[in-house]
Image (cartoon, helix red, strand yellow):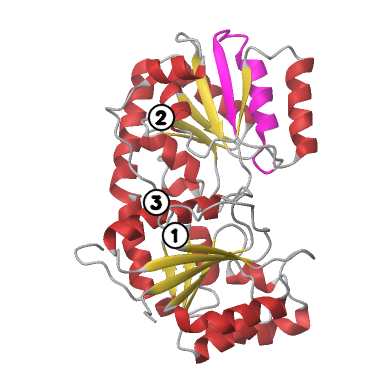
Amino acid sequence: MSRARVLHVFKYFRPQFTGEGIFVERLAHAFATLRPDVAHEVAVTVTRAPAGTLPPEHLSAVHYLSGPDGAASQREIAAWLSRHAGRYAAIHYHTHVDRTFAASLMLKLKGCRLILSATLDDSIEGLLLTYRRKLRPLTRQLFRLIDRFVAISPKLYAENNRYVPARKSSLIPIGIAIPDLHAPGARSSREKLAIDPNAKVLVSVGGICARKDQMFLVRQVHALAKDHPDLLLVLVGPDVEPDYAHAVRAYVADHGLEQQVRFAGYSEAPWDFYRAADIMVFASHEEGFGTVVIEAMAYGLAVVARHLPGVNDTFVEQGRSGFLFTRDDEFRTHVDRLLRSDEERRRMGAHGRGFVVDHYNIVDVAARYLALYGFPAEGRP
C-alpha cells in the first residue's frame, strides 16, 4: 500500500464546531492542488460519527474512534493507531490526544513522522502543566518522540522553544484563501442579508462564549449608538456557552438594542458578512491566532481588536490596518474615529488586505506543511 498518506488527529470534528478542523478542511483543497498524489485522512477521538455523511471534499476518510460509551480511551487510541500505522507516512496531532505516548512510541517504531501542533494554550509549556508534577520530567522526555512541533503564533512558538531545540520547532501561521474583491460587493451582500444599505455595520465572528467576550461588544454598542443611531453589530457564531449567550441576549433585550445587535448564528463561510461590514471588531481575551481577523482584513476591513501580545500584534499594524485596544474607552474611541471617516476605513482596509495577501496565503501555508510531512511541493516555499 502507498505510503503517500497523512493522518490528521483531532479530538473534535464534524459535526462539532472546531476552528482547527475547519482550517484543515480548507488546507485539504490546497494540499490537493499542490500534491494530488498525497492522500489526507482524519481520525477523531471524542466526536461521535454523524449518520449518513461523506468526508469533506479532498479528505479521503474521516475515522471516528469514539463508541457508544463515549470518547475513545488512551488504550483504544493507541490500538487503532498501531493497527493502521503502516498506512501513513506522517501523523499530525492537531491536539494532544496521546497522553501516555504509547501510540507515539509504536508509530515511531513503524517509521511514521510525528507532528504536534500548538493552537491555543497547548504549547509544550502548557501541556506539561496538565500532568502531575512528579510526572513532568518523564513527560518532557517523552515529548522527544515528536519529530516537529508547530506553533501558529509567535507567543506559542516562544513557549515551545523553551523546551525543544530550534531544529524541531516551526512557526506556521494560519492561512486563508485570498478572496476576489471583484465578486459581489457590499450592496449585494447587504441585500442578501437584509441589512439596511445605510447602516454602519460592525461584524464579529466567533462562537458566543466568555472567552470571545461578545458581552463587551454589546455594551460598547449601547454606548456608541447614542452618537451613531444607524450602528448595527452583527455577531456571527454559534452559542458555544448557552448560559453566557442567554445573558448577552438578555442584555440586548433589557436595553432595547434589538435594532443595533443581530445574532446571525453559525456560518461556516461568513464571506457575505465581511462584504457587508464596515469594520471588524474582536474582543476575545485569548486566541492561538485569530483567523477571523485576517479573514476580515483580506476583505478590506479595518480592524479594532483586543490586544493579545505575541498573537494579533503580528498582523494588525496599529494605525495602519486597524487598532488594538486594551481599555473600554480605547475601543470606543477607535470605532468612533473609523465610523466618522470612510476614507480612513478604506485606507486601513487596503493596507491590511495587502499584508494578508503577502503573508497568509493558504497555498503557501499548505506548502510548508507538506514539506514537514515529507512531501515538498515544487516551486513553493
Disc 3 from disc 1: Cα separation: 18 Å
Residue 313 position in % (x across, y down): 46, 46
Q: Residue at horizontal 57%, vertical 28%? A: 331
Do the CB atoms of the residues marked 3 and 2 lie less than 8 Å apart? no
Disc 3 from disc 2: Cα separation: 17 Å
- Please name the amino acid that badge 2 sits on: Leu
Residue 140 visible in rendering: no
* Residue placed furthest toward the left: 379
| Residue for badge 3 | 175
- Please name the amino acid that badge 1 sits on: Leu
Marks 1 and 2, the one that precedes in the sequence: 1
Res. 69 image quadrant: bottom right
Q: Which label belongs to residue 301?
A: 2
Whether residue 311 is situated above or below residue 156 in the rendered picture: above
Residue 190 position in % (x across, y down): 45, 17
Q: Which residues are magenta?
A: 211-236
| Residue for badge 1 | 59
Q: Quadrant of the N terminus?
A: bottom left
Residue 209 position in % (x across, y down): 70, 40
Instruction: Check residue 234 for magenta coloring.
Output: yes
* Residue placed furthest toward the bottom: 109
| Mark 2: few/some/many CA within 10 Å (<14, 14-19, 20+) | many
